[in-house]
Image (cartoon, rainbow, N blue to C red):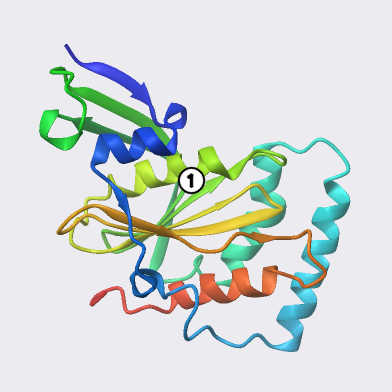
């Protein structure tokens, strides 16, 4: 019998068990968020300072997931040039993954179908470049990490790394997965607006570095 699961209901332990996923502990696995980051100019830093100020003010009021996308996520992706050729995006992209016995560690003989919707999916040609999960303010990123990993592992480009970006507007984290030869993932540090230093500088630098990657060879 086929059992249906919602991607948003899975925790990290379940995702790791379902996909045979392990965390890559080698620093070299995910250097893209640490090395060769582009410099920001003064205008970009001023714009990010204003974005931080605006969002911290809006945090004083109730804010939905859609508001987080509008106020924080969209400006960041635009500044990183993900809204220009050769990239294109899909919003609320439907995903479903059928897991059979050899795909998971469970002894349950039944297959499972995992379904969900990716908030923002950025593609180049037919390759999944970046899976973006946005949550309402105050929402813990722990569930967003598990959900993003589930979607990333469903990428049709099995031989290429897939990157993820999760945010609730005030916190930000980057993810990387590979499927071959074995499913692995790694996370960046957690960035937050609740520091004197503006972490949005680093967030934009990482997004821009990902946008500039040679996706045809990497």
Front-lying residue, 211 or 104: 104
Q: Which residue is mark 1?
A: 145
- Is 104 or 179 nearer to us in this picture? 104
Q: Position of residue 137 (x, y in %)?
A: 71, 41
Q: Position of residue 147 (x, y in %)?
A: 44, 39
The residue located at (47%, 83%) in the rendering is: 35
Residue 136 shows in the view: yes
The residue that appears at 52% across and 75% down in the rendered structure is: 208
Relative height, residue 211 to residue 152 (above, below): below
> At which x and y percent is residue 34?
50, 77
Circle 1 Cα neighbour tier, 10 Å, few/some/many (<14 / 14–19 / ≥20): many
Give the total of numbered labels: 1
Identify the element where label 1 is drawn. Answer: helix
For this rendering, which residue is in front, 121 or 104? 104
Quadrant of the image containing the N terminus:
top left
Residue 81 visible (yes or no): no
In the rendered view, tell whether residue 178 sits above or below residue 32.
above
Q: Quadrant of the C terminus?
A: bottom left
Which residue is rendered at x = 67% and y = 39% of the image? 136
From the top left corner, tell me how far across and down residue 158 is, in percent: 19, 55
Query: In this rendering, is residue 34 above or below 56?
Result: below
Whether residue 165 sits left or right of residue 150 in the image: it is right
Give the residue at the far front of this rendering: 25
172 vs 174, left or right, is right
Quadrant assignment, res 54: bottom right
Q: Residue at x 39, y 72 (%)?
A: 27
Q: Is residue 201 left or right of residue 175?
A: right
């Amino acid at each position: 019998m086929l059992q249906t699961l919602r991607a948003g209901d899975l925790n990290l332990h379940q995702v790791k068990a379902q996909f045979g996923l392990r965390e890559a502990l080698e620093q070299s696995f995910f250097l893209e968020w640490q090395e060769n980051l582009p410099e920001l100019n003064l205008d970009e830093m001023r714009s990010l300072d204003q974005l931080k100020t605006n969002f911290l003010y809006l945090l004083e009021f109730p804010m939905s997931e859609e508001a987080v996308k509008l106020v924080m996520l969209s400006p960041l992706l635009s500044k990183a040039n993900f809204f220009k050729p050769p990239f294109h995006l899909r919003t609320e992209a439907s995903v479903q993954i059928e897991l059979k016995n050899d795909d998971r560690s469970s002894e349950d003989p039944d297959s499972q179908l995992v379904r969900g919707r990716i908030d923002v999916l950025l593609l180049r040609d037919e390759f999944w470049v970046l899976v973006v999960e946005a949550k309402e303010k105050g929402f813990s990123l722990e569930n967003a990490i598990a959900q993003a990993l589930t979607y990333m592992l469903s990428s049709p480009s099995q031989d290429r790394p897939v990157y993820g970006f999760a945010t609730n507007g005030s916190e930000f984290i980057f993810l990387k997965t590979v499927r071959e030869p074995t499913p692995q993932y790694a996370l960046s540090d957690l960035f937050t607006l609740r520091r004197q230093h503006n972490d949005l500088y680093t967030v934009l630098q990482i997004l821009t570095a990902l946008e500039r990657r040679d996706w045809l060879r990497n």
